[in-house]
Each structure stands twice: as C-alpha cells, then as structure tokens.
Image (cartoon, rainbow, N blue to C red):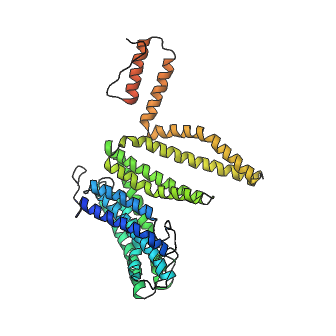
Amino acid sequence: MTPGTPARRVPLARPGTAWVLGGLLLALAIVDVPLSRLAHQSLNASGGSVPVWVSAAYGLVGVVVAWRKPGNPLGWVFLFAGLFTALSEDASFYMVADYQLHHGSLPLGWAAVLTQPGWAPAITLLGVAVLLFPDGRPPSRRWRWLLWAYLAVAALWIGGTAVISVGAIAGHDIRVDSGGNLIGLTGGAAGPDAWFGVVQDVFFPLLALCWLLSVASQVVSYRRSSGERRQQLKWMLAGAIAGAAGLLLAVLLGGAGLPGLVRDILAVGGMLALPVSMGVAVFKYRLLDIDRILSRTLSYAIVTGLLIGVYAGLVLLATRVLKVHGTVAVAAATLAAAALFAPVRRRVQHVVDRRFNRARYDADRTLAAFTSRLTEALDLDAVRGDLAGTVQAALEPAHISVWLAGDR
C-alpha cells in the first residue's frame, strides 16, 4: 500500500462504537472507587496495573481519535489499551479483597483472575501504536514483517499469562501479592509455574527489541519525510522525550526525598505525554508549533539533567572531600545551581534551536544583524526598507506595512 492510498476501514469502526466503548471505560473507572475501598487500598495504587487516571486518559485520547477518524486504527489501539488497563486495575483490587482479605469467599473471583493480566495486551498495543503512527500503517511494506513478528512474540507472552491464570483456577491454587498479581505471573514463582519466569526472561528482551525497531522505523521515516508528515513525527518525538524525562525524574528524584504528590505528577505526566502528543499529531492541529515545543522540551530536559549533575557533584565534593557540614553543602549547591540556570539555559537553548528550531535560530541571527545595522543608519527610508526586508526574511508574512510617527 502506497502512502497516498486511503487506509482500510476497521471492522465495526464507527463513531457510535467509540462512544459505547468509551462508556464502558467510564464505568470501569467508576467501579474502581468502591473496589479500591473493598481492598483497603488507595485509588492511586498501581501494583497490579496503572492508576485509573492513566487508563482514563489513554481511553479519552482513543475515544476522540476513533470518533473523529474511525478509519485510523490508532484511536482504537489507544481506546483498547485504556480498557485493558482499567479492567486490569479493577481485577487487581478485587483479587486483593477476595484472596488476601476474604480468603476466596467473594463471588466471581475466577473472573478477576482471568482479566487481571490485561496489562499484557495493553503493553502490546502501545508498541503497535508506535509502529503504526501516524496513519495506521507501517512506514513501508518492508516493515510489515516487524509488525507480524512483534504480534507473534506478544501473542506467546499473552498466551503464557492465560495459561498461568487458567492453571491457577483449575488447580484451586490462587495466590496473589499485595498488588493483586498472581504469584505465578511475577516471574519469581517456583514449582510448576517457574517456566513462565524463563518465558519472560526470553520474551521481554524480544519485545524490547521490537519496540526499538519500531522506533527505528519511525526515525527512517522521519529522515525520508517532509512537510506535514515530518511535523507529525516531530510531535511523537516530543512526546517520547517528555514522557521519558518525566518518568526518569520521578524515579531519580523519588529516591532523593521528592514529595509524593510531585513524584506522582511527574510519573503520570510522563505516561500521558506520548499518547497526547500522538493524538494531536493525528488531528494535525497547530503542527507548526512543534518546533518551538520540541526545542523547549529538549533544552529544559538537558538543563535539568546538567543542573542535577552539578548539584549532586557539588554536594558530594563538599561533604565527602571538603568535609563541609551537610546543611551548608546543600545550601551552597542549591545557590550554585540557581545561579547557573539562566546562562546554561541560554547556551543550551541556542544549541538546540540551531538543530531543532532552525527558523527561530535564523530569525534571531537576522534580527541581531538588523540591530547592529540600525545603530549606524541615518536615512529613514533606508531604515524602513531594511526593517521590511528583515521582517520578511525572519517571519515571511503575506503582507508588510510599516508606519512611522513622522508619516502623514
């Protein structure tokens, strides 16, 4: 299928179907509240899946895309990823309540055991979304083999979770951890379920490899693309960078005593950055702003990493080498990092704009050259012409009008 060929319609892909599935997702999210209380756990608990806020956000992106563009599989991929994770979280709470608190006396516990591994197809669908971005097809025919290989590996993995779950029900040996996961699915089980740990050790690297190849396919597509498609791929890149930065900061700073609320905001923001950016790109809304967003995201991520490194290095130097009191060392390192923020940000922003936001970089250079010429200009008409030429070169407007106070 060539890039200009219209995408095939997905069976049952209708706006009404999107709203029905969205309503189901809303119901699963609402049910999460009483189930979390039944399990005596926080609604933000994510030991068995992801918090309901993340599931609802993924599903919302999917509903909007599937409703407005039902022929694009990406909307349905995000919608079903949200459904699977919401179902998995509900089942996790119910399994804790049933098999840890009530010793298996609650009804329909077997249904929770079967649906709790919904995180497996959800993870698989996220990989599919990257490979099929932005129009629901692989970048070229040559990448179809990767899609089928990825789906085959994922099917074996998902099949393994189903075998463990059915075996636990048939053997009346249902043991769960504090997050609601079957012990046999955690990879550390001994006995007859030990084989699944080996399966995960083999298939997780294969899945990761398929993900990396999916990203590589988008990189290749980006280098060969132009215009609107390149802007869409930039949106996905910005979302991936923001997501990785948010999750990394949540993990690194969480160990340094970061408040729980801030850590949760960073983690949730990291998990939502990619689907939101991909949804925006699919709708092609304000795509030209992505150069500015991408350059800002990259520059602040680099500056944050550099300043964290400087801060940690100064603290270690002061406390371990110079033997300075810990409070004084922390205060001095904080002041140094704050003093370095502005100059480091300007320098990093300049370098990033040169590579990722060339329009602004060229515009800044054009304006700087105009400013230097303006200090030596005496002829008002020459200044007027130079100003119009500079604005045309920097902004490329459709029309230019220059009005000076002396004009009549």
Q: Is residue 138 among the parts visible in the rendering? A: no
Task: Report the residue at 29% width, 53% height from top.
Answer: 135
Task: Report the residue at 32% width, 43% height from top.
Answer: 228
Task: Report the residue at 37% width, 26% height from top.
Answer: 392
Q: Quadrant of residue 209?
A: bottom left
Where does residue 389 sit, x and y in percent of width and height?
Answer: 39, 22
Where does residue 319 sit, x and y in percent of width and height?
Answer: 74, 53
| On-image quarter of the C terminus | top left
Q: Is residue 244 among the parts visible in the rendering? A: yes
Judged from this view, the residue extending furthest toward the bottom is 171
Position of residue 36 relative to residue 103, above or below, is above
Where does residue 179 sit, x and y in percent of width and height?
Answer: 50, 73
Task: Report the residue at 30% width, 60% height from top.
Answer: 144
| On-image quarter of the N terminus | bottom left
Q: Quadrant of residue 262?
A: bottom right
- 102 or 338: which is nearer to us? 102
Where does residue 162 sit, x and y in percent of width and height?
Answer: 38, 78
Left or right relative to 3: residue 36? right
Left or right relative to 321: residue 119? left
